[in-house]
Image: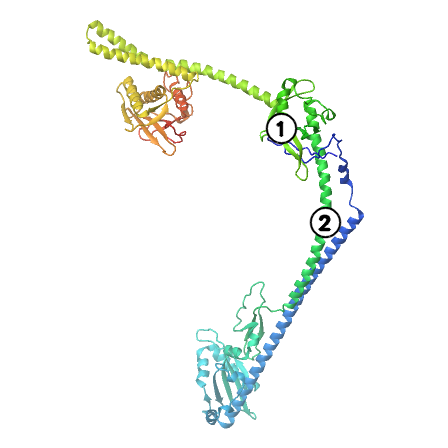
Amino acid sequence: MLGIMASAPSPSERAPPPTAVPMTASPPPDDFALLHASKRSLPDRSRWTVLWMMGLAVLIVAAVLALVWYLDRFESEEEERRRGADAQWLEQSVQFHFRRLEDDVAQLARQAALDGPGSWRARERAAPEGLPAGLLWRAPGVVVAHAWLAEQQGASAGDIAAWQEDQLRSESNRQALQTLEDIVRGLRRASYAGPMREADGGSTDRVWLAMPYFDGARLAGIYVVQLAVRQAVDAMLPPWFLQKQAVRLVVDGEPPITAAPQAPQPYRTVMNLPGTDLLLEVVPQGPQTSPAPRIFFLVALLFLLGMLASLAALRRDFGKRQRVQQRLQAEVALRTAMERSVTIGMRAWDMQGHILYVNQAFCAMLGYTSEELRGRRAPLPYWPPEQAERLAELHASVIRGGTQPGGIEAQFRHKDGHLVDVLIHEAPLTTADGTQRGWMSSVLDISERKRAQQLAALQQEKLEASARLVAVGEVASTLAHELNQPLGALSSFANGLLNRLERGSIAPSELKAVAQRMAGLAERAGGVTQRVNAFARKRELNLKRLDLAPLVRRAARSAQEAHGHGAALDLQVPGEAVQVLGDALLLEHLVHNLCSNALDWARHGSAPPQVQVRLEVRAQAFGHVCLSVADSGPGVPESAQARIFDAFYSTKDGGMGMGLAICRSIAEAHHGRILVARDPLLGGALFTAELPLAGDPLPTCEP
């Protein structure tokens, strides 16, 4: 079976290389049987395998999601349990230590009531080991002050000043301490008051503990102790507890600490000190859960991923087989579609020149059937007999090395006898292992393009003929415009010479100068005729390397002499040479015409007539010279600037409208340009002619 694929045409009218074709002795028939395979479904066995793999994959994903949900719930419950245990332990620890402190203070109250404060102080100094031994009492900084407030007048002892200072410091302190005394008197038990406030109303961490002592039904006194609660909290929390959480004292309902969104949230527990509203806030620090569940999850996840990878590999094998089958079906369908829709002729041949394959477009292009062409070799039936030798050489060279990227053009003969212009591209026809078996040709019918090119060439000839007719009109107008001044001057000189000869008032030496001037004017008129005629007939200009500076001076002075001395002429020409490549006569005519126009229009301005001619070399990187001619006249209106260089367009009364059109033609013939604007100094028109320096690129400056 011959496996040849036809390719669709590209926008550049070149066909891409086709697929490989094996070399055969005779052309086999086309076979598209694989196209029907697209309607067949997969075997039942493969379909059930795919469904089983999909079900297993869903089960694995569900197991992973369930495991993630279980671990998350387990960690949350574990965290709640741990926080509850820590809060319960912290609350019990606070109660234990403060109850022990209350026992120690009760013992001190009993000793102070029975022995008297003086004897108790003496025993404290003599035998410190007999004092209370609780943790909070022994911890440094916890007990700030303590005193015995006896009911008997003059029997009080200890740091009574601290008690009195807190009463005097704030009204709220006085009320709290007074309430504390009332509670211990009435309830006959220990109580707390606080936290104490500063004079400015700020809270402190200090509270007072009051312990009454009754002798029967009679109150003997109250033992008060001032405590620093923050030091007490630091003293009673062990290091192992502080490794995983930080504890701070919350006074007066301070707002809780804001934790990060993913961090464990802090929680609070009450201190259960009667008469106070003190809380402890616990902030978890570091990882709170055990890593064992996560390790278990990672191990299980690895196993599940391994199973998924195995399923994916198995699915990939099934998918590969399906893709190969679908690709074959798509290729066959694509070939069939190309066979029916492509308009580029496709032809395949082997290395010996036998035609292996032609498509319908190729057959329609030449009028032959596929059976008439396949198996044929040179000379081919569609070769014109008169070009058979040339096409045979071309055929042999194509078989040896193919075609160039641009393809080759040739003529084939249709079966009915008319010639068909074609563009042929060749691409190697290779097998799957890269062995070349022949060539695949894309043949594009370019007959219409050839006819269009011929029609375009004919139209171009007509346009050139029209341009030559326009040039004839320009020649006539230019001759009338340019010869007017030299012929008028020549006539004036001749009439003056005749008058002086009749009067006998001219010397021989003067006669020679006048004759030379008349000869120069006649030569100039003849040169103008020749150059303008040559320029209109599209002949080569007489380009020479010349210095533009003296040419500008000469042409400007000539224009001034021709117009008299009514306007001041300011020449700004550099002293060094300005070398350009141009026709001296045409460039002189360009300068003369611009200066003449400027001198004419300068008289129509409101200011004194003045003309300024500037020649300067600008933009050395681009290498060009700018010739600017400005006048003090009314200038060119903006509405006329777009048409000022058009032929037969003039803003001057009685003007022919050819002077500036000729100037533009001369500038463009020298690869330059001419621009018009308003001069900022004189206020009139500013014409700028840009010309390239000798051996430099085109100009790009602005006036």
Q: Which residue occupies 46% across, 73% down?
A: 202
Q: Between residue 133 and residue 6, name the one nearer to us.
A: 6
In the shown orientation, is residue 596 left or right of residue 278? left
Amino acid type at image mark 2: Asp
Q: Are marks 2 and 1 in contact (CB under 8 Å)?
A: no
In the shown orientation, is residue 588 left or right of residue 197? left
Amino acid type at image mark 1: Val
Residue 548 at what x, y percent from top left?
Answer: 32, 25
Q: Which residue occupies 67% across, 17% down?
A: 417
Compared with residue 479, is residue 632 higher up or lower down, i.e. above or below?
Answer: below
Q: Between residue 91 and residue 26, name the one nearer to us.
A: 26
Q: Quadrant of the N terminus?
A: top right
Q: How far apart are marks 2 and 1 (CA)?
A: 44 Å
Query: In which image quadrant can residue 355 be found?
Result: top right
Secondary structure, mark 1, is helix
Q: Which of marks 2 and 1 is in front?
A: 1
Residue 648 at what x, y percent from top left?
Answer: 41, 18
Q: Between residue 74 and residue 679, name the one nearer to us.
A: 74
Compared with residue 17, is residue 77 higher up or lower down, i.e. above or below?
Answer: below
- Given the current orientation, which residue lies at the most extreme right position? 44
Residue 326 circle label: none
Q: Which residue occupies 39% across, 16% down?
A: 532
Query: In which image quadrant can residue 499 be found?
Result: top left
In the shown orientation, is residue 143 left or right of residue 71? left
Compared with residue 376, is residue 328 higher up or lower down, i.e. above or below?
Answer: below
Q: Quadrant of the C terminus?
A: top left
Q: Which residue occupies 70% across, 52% down?
A: 313
Q: Which of marks 2 and 1 is nearer the N terminus?
A: 2
Residue 170 at what x, y percent from top left?
Answer: 45, 77
Residue under numbered circle 1: 398
Residue under numbered circle 2: 317
